[in-house]
Amino acid sequence: MNVKYMYSLLAVIVLFLVSYVLAGTGTAFKVLFGIILPYAALLTFIIGFISRIMNWGRSAVPFRITTTCGQQKSLPWIKPNAIDNPFSKGAVVVRMFLEIVLFRSLFRNTRLKMKVGPKIYYQLEIFLWAGALAFHYAFLTVLLRHLRFFTEPVPLPVRLLETVDSFFRLEVLYDVSQFGLPGVYISGLVLLAAVIYLFLRRILIPNVKYISLAADFFPLFLIFGIAFTGILMRYVAKIDVIAAKELTMGLVTFHPTIPEGLASIFYVHVFFVSILLAYFPFSKLMHLGGIFFSPTRNMPADTRATRHINPWNYPVHVHTYEEYEDEFREKMIDAGLPVVKQPVEAPPEETEEKE
Amino acid sequence: MSDKKLIIAGVVIFVAVVAFPFWFNMGKAAPAPELELTERAKELNHGKCVMPTDYMQSEHMQLLDLWRHSVVRNAKRTFVNTSGQEFNMSLTNTCLDCHANKAEFCDRCHDYASVRPYCWDCHIDNPKETE
């Protein structure tokens, strides 16, 4: 039994039960879960996100600590690796872009293994990269798809995305049960599967389990809860979609309403999303903004060409040798020490030295 | 510093993206669509559909899918609802018989919720509408 994930799991279960029961009791709690908390959460998200970004922006960058994964630009006949050892700002932009859209540093994940005999080899550990890609892109698709609830008329790109997402027309039909209408969005299922994979990875791999904290499990359970309630509402315990859109459109046009006949599960879904938004700026989820501030990625590795000025450098008072000699010249000469600059007003001493 | 400018630009983009639904719908009222029932739908079967209204609102697609399966795979065309009434399982002849006004009945909600059912790939508009 691991307290770290049990606490997170319990927290999400309690949140589910509390919102499910309270949303069923009356309009007052529906207003809370459907109007007040979403607005409060969105404000927390935006203000918290910006304040953390600005805080990072104010931080000093004392050293140029670019991680390099290739040959630096040097002599003309040595082929440099422009992207993995960026020398210009343009190359940094390319590197950051590829990092953000393809997670290249996760792709480099290797695991050291001992083979029979004294042989060490590095195994490419590709599953985290694949899982992370699946998770992030499924989440992005789900997020963009939800714009159909927040826009009227629904923009064409959102409708195109829906068409692509429901491309497979997955359908399971028996005489009494059916699954597949409304059209199955593959992104929802991928998101659920990926979040389960990311969770299992944290509890099944011993060394990953050892470094996993409650703050790692909580977002996973929360996102699982969001995906699960969403899928439940779409395919199993169907809700009145028109009423749902009435509520969400009320939120974005600042005319909030609580339509009749929305099932409690909808309020649970909205409550979970509100928690995720409000929790976002205070958690590891801030890597959404933090990725842009990765000092090992966002600086060119050009320290051989340009000097990186450390902002911590303050004007140091230096006492140069010239100043030192000016101060102690006569005493030095008295003690018989050599001096660089001869005193001009003492020609007789010169003759003494010559003797 | 140039970094400061970049960060400010990033923050502006972030706010613009997050607030997209707010400025996209600025000044627009988007009330939920009102459905229109035809006279025939109000009269026939005492104004009742094959199943209760709230069930039909959220589950009609499931019912139609099961009907299609029953007709196409099992050749069974009779649907018995919870109060024992019998209906012919047919979108064109049963559903669209009453709800002949596809534009005012089906399409309003489907457009509002951005749903494009593939029913209409085969079941074209009820011929009665063109009369």
Image (cartoon, grey):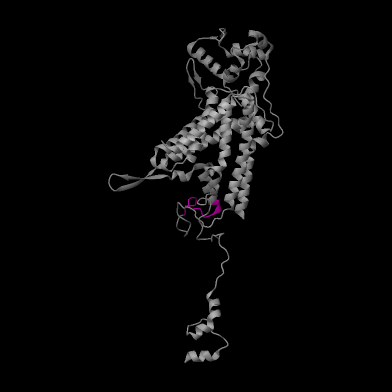
Residue A184 in sight in this render: no
Kindly give the residue lying farthest to the right in the view shown.
B27
**Residue at the (64%, 38%) spot, across then down:** B19
Residue A302 in sight in this render: yes
A83 part of magenta stretch? yes
Number of marks: 0
Q: Is residue A16 above or below residue A308?
A: above
Q: Is residue B4 above or below residue B53?
A: below
Quarter assignment of residue B24: top right
User: Residue A355: x and y, percent?
Assistant: 47, 92
User: Residue A175: x and y, percent?
Assistant: 48, 15
Main SS of the magenta segment?
A: loop
User: Residue A86: x and y, percent?
Assistant: 51, 53
Q: Is residue A16 above or below residue B2?
A: above
Front residue (pair B34, A80): B34
Front residue (pair B74, A67): A67
Q: Is residue A104 above or below residue A183?
A: below
In the image, taking residue B76 as reference, residue B11 lies left or right, namely right
- The magenta-colored residue range is A80-90
Quarter assignment of residue B103: top right
A340 part of magenta stretch? no
**Residue at the (55%, 85%) spot, across then down:** A343
Front residue (pair A312, B112): A312
**Residue at the (69%, 26%) spot, across then down:** B31
Kindly give the residue lying farthest to the left in the view shown.
A117
